[in-house]
Image (cartoon, rainbow, N blue to C red):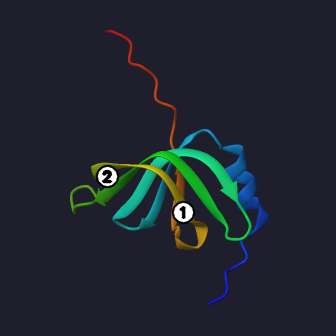
Amino acid sequence: MPEQELPPSIFYMLERNVGKKIRVILDPSYGFEGTLVAVTQAPLSGIWLSDAEVIVLRSTMAQPVPQVASREERGELYLNLNSVQRIEILPPTQPRANR
């Protein structure tokens, strides 16, 4: 099966967010979180993550929005964009002030 041609706007969005923490969903219950370190267009379109973690997502009838149920460290990781369903840019975590 030939590789799909992705619109350039996807690569612009990803390149703008290099260095930020992202969540990449591969299917409704499985994905990765990590720091976006590189975006490639050739030979295959994909992204490189550092400090990557495998995440398992779960939802219930009472809470239908999927939540992270478990994590496992993976290190460096390459993901082909053809297998990605969704990419979320995570907000930067700030240390909590003492109350």
Identify the residue at image location x=67%, y=55%: 39
Residue at disc 2, secondary structure: strand
Say left or right for 77 vs 99. Answer: right
Q: Which residue is mark 1?
A: 79
Task: Measure the alpha-carbon separation of dots 2 and 1.
Answer: 22 Å
Quadrant into which the C terminus falls: top left
Q: Is residue 5 above or below residue 46?
A: below
Residue that appears at 53% across and 67% down:
84
- The front one of 62 and 24 is 24
Question: What x and y, as percent, mark residue 86?
Answer: 52, 62
Q: Residue furthest bottom?
A: 1
Foreground: disc 2 or disc 1: 1
Question: How many residues crowd mark 1 within 10 Å: few (<14), some (14–19), many (20+)?
Answer: some
| Number of residues whose C-alpha sits closer than 10 Å to that of mark 2, classed few (under 14), some (14–19) or many (20 or more) | some
| Residue designated by label 2 | 67
Q: Quadrant of residue 87?
A: bottom right
Give the x, y percent position of residue 36: 58, 46
Dot 2 or dot 1, earlier in sequence: 2
Q: Amino acid at mark 2?
A: Gln
Q: Is residue 57 left or right of residue 36?
A: left
Secondary structure category for the residue under label 1: strand
- Vertical arrangement, residue 74 with respect to residue 30, above or below: above
